């Protein structure tokens, strides 16, 4: 005779944001009289941007900073040279950053017309090295402000300097004498932009359409694995001894719907880690009196079985800016009737699985 023993099983969940700081087609023109008026017609356009001679502008130095007091929240003590920024680690959050360049033109600094920065994604597991955007600059006309900004960046070790120049020389012979100027442009990075080294090309053009040699630098968007969940409890309800019971999640992020969901709010792909106490069920000579299953998504191939106090990592990765369900199951082998409670700890690790 089968003995049915109802148990009320509830496990409380503590979320951990795991952080690891370890990136014209020349088609012929159809005669209008023969063309269907509804069809588009290609027309070739041409223009020639003239060059007017004169000296070529020079990008003496460039750097990138965030808006925090340390200029780089990923390395606030400036232990490593260059700029390093943390992602906002919040859904739909943005990271504000500022691009700077010191530009000199022999005809006089006022001869510089355009300063801009071309920014490229990282080339790694999460980024393909593609062009991201062009940031347009404006000149800082207050000389004292420009000097102070340069000095702060120099002290913090953020500067990239053109090969034949020296930071102190740029400060004393160009900025302090007013023969060069600091330009600035602002942009942001979305929370889900891939972690890694972003390539930056600082460009300058004078009024004679002379282009400077671009000055290349990089900044690091520090890899951070982080997620957000819409639940703080997994309630397995009534279960019977030696009966396997699942609680399914969904992909709708809706706190309070009792359907576990998580979303990636970091800047890397991530894998979920799980650790669970024994919920007071203990163990016998044959082993623990309870075990669980968990999976991200509904593919059984990604299910992991685990026992009390064992940390497991779910095998599949959650890509950047994605939301997925979490499914949990429980199987009690032995236990007294009544409600049992415990704590499940969810964490995350950076996943090298490409997005």
Image (tube, rainbow, N blue to C red):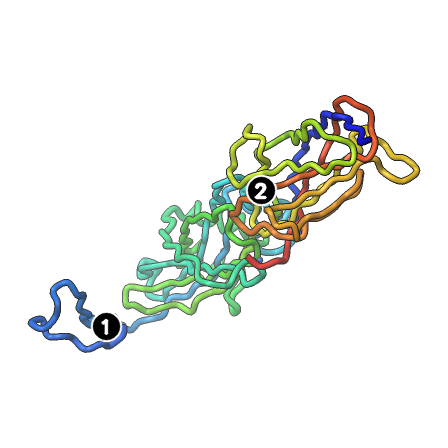
- The residue under the point 83% across, 35% down is 289
Quadrant containing the C terminus is bottom right
Task: Give left or right: position of 243 versus 232.
Answer: right
Q: Secondary structure at mark 2?
A: strand
Name the spot of residue 12 as percent of width and height, x first.
69, 29
Number of callouts? 2
Of residue 231 and residue 335, the one placed in the foreground of this image is: 335
Reply above or below: 127 against 31: above
Q: Can residue 14 be seen in this snapshot?
A: yes
Task: Please tell me how crowded label 1 is: few (under 14), some (14-19), or many (20+) other residues with Cα within 10 Å.
Answer: few
Q: Secondary structure at mark 1?
A: loop
Task: Give left or right: position of 314 versus 241.
Answer: left
Reply above or below: 6 against 67: above
Q: Can residue 169 be seen in this snapshot?
A: no
- The residue under the point 72% across, 28% down is 9
Query: Mark 2 or mark 1: which comes first in sequence?
Result: 1
Task: Give left or right: position of 355 versus 106.
Answer: right
Of residue 22 and residue 300, the one placed in the foreground of this image is: 300
Name the spot of residue 285 as percent of width and height, x first.
93, 38
Residue 293 in which image quadrant = top right
Of residue 281 and residue 44, the one placed in the foreground of this image is: 281
Reply above or below: 74 against 290: below
Residue 37 in which image quadrant = bottom left
The disc label shown at residue 10, or none: none
Does the residue at mark 2 contact the one at mark 1 (Cβ under 8 Å)?
no
Residue 340 in which image quadrant = top right
Cα separation between marks 2 and 1: 56 Å
The disc label shown at residue 325, or none: 2
The disc label shown at residue 48, or none: 1
């Amino acid at each position: 005779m089968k003995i049915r023993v109802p148990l009320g099983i509830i496990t409380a969940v503590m979320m951990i944001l795991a952080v690891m700081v370890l990136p014209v087609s020349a088609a012929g023109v159809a005669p209008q009289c023969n063309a269907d008026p509804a069809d588009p017609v290609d027309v070739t356009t041409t223009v020639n941007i003239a060059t007017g001679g004169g000296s070529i502008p020079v990008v003496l130095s460039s750097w990138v900073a965030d808006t925090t007091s340390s200029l780089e929240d990923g390395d606030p003590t400036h232990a490593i040279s260059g700029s390093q920024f943390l992602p906002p680690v919040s859904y739909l959050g943005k990271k504000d950053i500022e691009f700077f360049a010191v530009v000199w033109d022999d005809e006089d600094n006022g001869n510089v017309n355009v300063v801009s920065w071309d920014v490229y994604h990282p080339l790694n597991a999460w980024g393909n090295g593609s062009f991201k955007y062009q940031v347009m600059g404006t000149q800082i006309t207050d000389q004292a402000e420009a000097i102070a900004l340069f000095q702060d960046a120099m002290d913090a070790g953020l500067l990239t300097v053109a090969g034949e120049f020296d930071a102190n020389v740029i400060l004393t012979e160009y900025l302090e004498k007013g023969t060069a100027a600091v330009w600035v442009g602002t942009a942001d990075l979305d929370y889900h932009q891939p972690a890694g080294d972003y390539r930056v090309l600082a460009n300058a053009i004078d009024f004679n359409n002379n282009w400077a040699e671009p000055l290349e630098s990089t900044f690091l968007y520090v890899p951070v694995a982080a997620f957000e969940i819409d639940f703080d409890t997994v309630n397995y309800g009534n279960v019977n001894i030696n009966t396997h019971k699942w609680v399914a999640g969904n992909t709708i992020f809706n706190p309070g719907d009792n359907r576990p969901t998580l979303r990636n709010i970091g800047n890397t792909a991530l894998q979920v880690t799980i650790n669970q106490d024994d919920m007071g069920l203990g163990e016998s000579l044959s082993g623990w009196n309870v075990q669980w299953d968990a999976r991200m998504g509904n593919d059984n191939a990604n299910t992991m079985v685990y026992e009390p106090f064992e940390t497991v990592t779910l095998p599949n990765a959650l890509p950047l800016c994605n939301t997925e369900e979490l499914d949990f199951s429980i199987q009690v082998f032995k236990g007294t009737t009544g409600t049992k409670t415990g704590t499940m700890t969810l964490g995350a690790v950076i996943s090298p699985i490409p997005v």
